[in-house]
Amino acid sequence: MPPTARKLAAGPCMGAVLLLVACGATDSGAGDTDAAAPAPVSAPTGAPALDVEVVLDGLDHPWDVAQAPDGTLLVDERAGGLTAVLPDGEARTLDADFDDLFAEGETGLMGLALDPAFADNRRFYTCQGVQSADGAEIQVVAWTVDEGWTTATRVADPLLGGIPVNADSGRHGGCRVEFGPDGAFFVGTGDNALGTNPQDLGSLAGKVLRIDPDTGEALPDNPFTADADAADRIWTYGHRNVQGLAVHPDSGQVYSVEHGPDRDDEVNLLQPGADHGWDPVGAGVYDESVPMTAPGAVPAVWSSGEPTIAPSGATFLDGEAWGDYDGLLLIGVQKDTGVLALRLTDDGELVESFRLPELEDAHGRIRTPEQGQDGALYVTTDDGDGEDQLLRVTPAS
């Protein structure tokens, strides 16, 4: 499916902004703990003012964004399509094959990541729904792009397959991809709204996977490599719908962001082999009334309580230019179109949370925030109907 028409923005937006707003799910959060108090819509004293400019508009549900070493921005759209925004501002739709894309509901062309050695190998990765003669599934595909940013070519098709998809509705398709500091490749998946998936170690759904980006195989130190009944690519399990993955720039800790049902959206600090507690089997059906984190499972470092906020992509801000925002985990909010900022200790303990007033109700929903290699924050909105934008956010000078 071809991408919709898009155009370069003429100039900066009015007002200051920090971050992201998120994706488009209608559910999120469950649990039996007391409801969390809403985060205040105010920034800490000494926080910098933020400038926001529209880099590109005319997009339709852009899902992810990454910046190459030469400054080029690569953006994908859920219904199919890759757009490169060159350093001189030219926007270019790449020639790429999406004829087999399965785009239904929440599933389509989703997570995007550049290889750490992109400058040498021109390789990047997508996580996407795929339709074949054998049915639909979710796959991670490796691509290369030419130096002129005109054509993307599949080179590992798939790098990783066999991730289940809800072929009827596309519900809970995940799917975020992120590199760890050691070069390991993480893939966050959804549970496909099938109650047995999150706790089934034989299924890749409702998991965070850890693989070799060259081969797609499990890394030898994964926690379940010695378990004949488990999928050796699994890093953590018991997830509902992983919408964000973020790596702490100093500690290398990997955090996941996911939707709950009626309450308790979560941010989780991932540890190898951990059960993060989503177990919605109930009376043999997909029981969304159960707690988001079952007793005995690894607790979340943050949960929304009730109401939920439907979080999506996430990124850590890193750099002295961000002042008091340096080190924050920023998370997109899609239910009430704002940005949640979390300050965490080195051990993953929550210190404070607040909503950024500059972005509150300013650009609608935002799917993904991602800090670029130039230190700026890049944000994709997610309002649909060809009205979406790619934003650039920087501290005001």
Image (cartoon, helix red, strand yellow):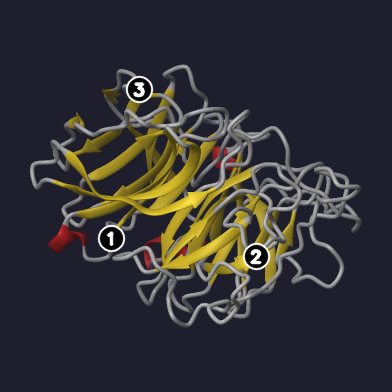
**Residue 395 horizontal side relative to residue 364, left or right:** left
**Residue 393 horizontal side relative to residue 82, left or right:** right
For residue 90, the mark is: none
Image quadrant in which you'd find residue 109: top left
Q: Which residue is mark 2?
A: 201
**Residue 117 horizontal side relative to residue 330, left or right:** left
> Percent from the top left, x then y, of residue 291?
85, 55
Q: Give the Cα separation between the discs numbered 1 and 2.
A: 28 Å
Q: Is residue 181 above or below residue 172?
A: below
> Percent from the top left, x then y, of residue 327?
50, 67
> Percent from the top left, x then y, of residue 293?
80, 61
- Which tag is nearer the camera, tag 2 or tag 3? 2
Amino acid type shown at disc 2? Leu
Q: Which residue is at the front of the view, 11 or 70?
A: 70
Q: Which residue is mark 3?
A: 1
**Residue at the location (14% across, 40% down)?**
149
**Residue 333 horizontal side relative to residue 321, left or right:** right
Q: Is residue 352 above or below residue 80?
A: below
Q: Which residue is at the front of the view, 107 or 270?
A: 107
Image quadrant in which you'd find residue 392: top left
Q: Which residue is at the front of the view, 130 or 20?
A: 130
Where disc 2 sits, the SS reads loop
Q: Earlier in the sequence, mark 2 or mark 3?
A: 3
Amino acid type shown at disc 1? Asp
Query: Quick one: quadrant of the N terminus?
Result: top left
Does residue 396 appear in this view?
Answer: no
